[in-house]
Amino acid sequence: MAEDVTVAKNPTLRKDAEPPNSMDESEGLILPDGRAAPFRVECNVDEDMSLSVPAAEASITVSQRIRRRGDEQLSDSVQVLCGERDDGSVTVRVLIWTPKFPDGLQIALVTSRPGRAAADNDLIECDLGHKQIESLPG
């Protein structure tokens, strides 16, 4: 079973405080080319299968069974896209597909800037504004 990393709704964090679900970088987050990985991707399926790997980028898609016109089929419902931008920022985008948004909808963009050590640098920026996928920059 997956480890519970639930964070209290209103944790009190100073800007220099360690986030409650963070881990030490020394836990094997090195890519094959020797660079520090911007991401660690962890996936647990049932109790039998799991994956935990460092990643330069990642795409995770969850499809779920639906019934359309009397037929059962799998339909993509959630996709998580992780990547590093040219400016060094690291982003995680969460996209959903529903009958109301068949072309997709971004429901979250989480950004960190690990290369910037400014005192006013927030640990993570979170944009929960909903944006249709065709209106997003490439």
Image: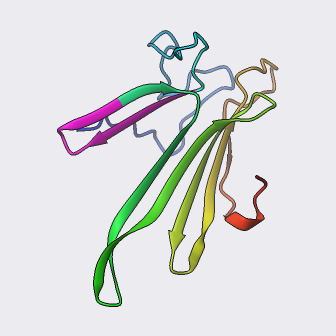
Compare residues 106 and 33 and report the one nearer the observer: 33
Q: Is-magenta flag for residue 50?
A: yes
Compare residues 126 and 86 and report the one nearer the observer: 86
**What colouring does the structure picture have?**
rainbow
- In this rendering, is residue 110 above or below 75? above
Q: How many marks?
A: 0
Q: Residue at x 56, y 80 (%)?
A: 100
- In this rendering, is residue 24 above or below 69? above
Q: Residue 1: horizontal and vertical position, in percent?
A: 22, 38
Left or right, 126 with respect to 88, comes to left
Q: Which residues are magenta?
A: 39-51
Q: Residue at x 65, y 26 (%)?
A: 14
Could you tell me what secondary structure mostly forms the magenta stretch?
A: strand
Q: Residue 36: horizontal and vertical position, in percent?
A: 59, 15
Q: Residue at x 58, y 34 (%)?
A: 57
Whether residue 51 appears in this view of the structure is yes
Where residue 16 sits, quadrant-wise, is: top right
Q: Residue 86: horizontal and vertical position, in percent?
A: 79, 32
- In this rendering, is residue 133 above or below 114? below
| Most distant residue in the bottom direction | 69
Q: Residue 133: horizontal and vertical position, in percent?
A: 68, 64
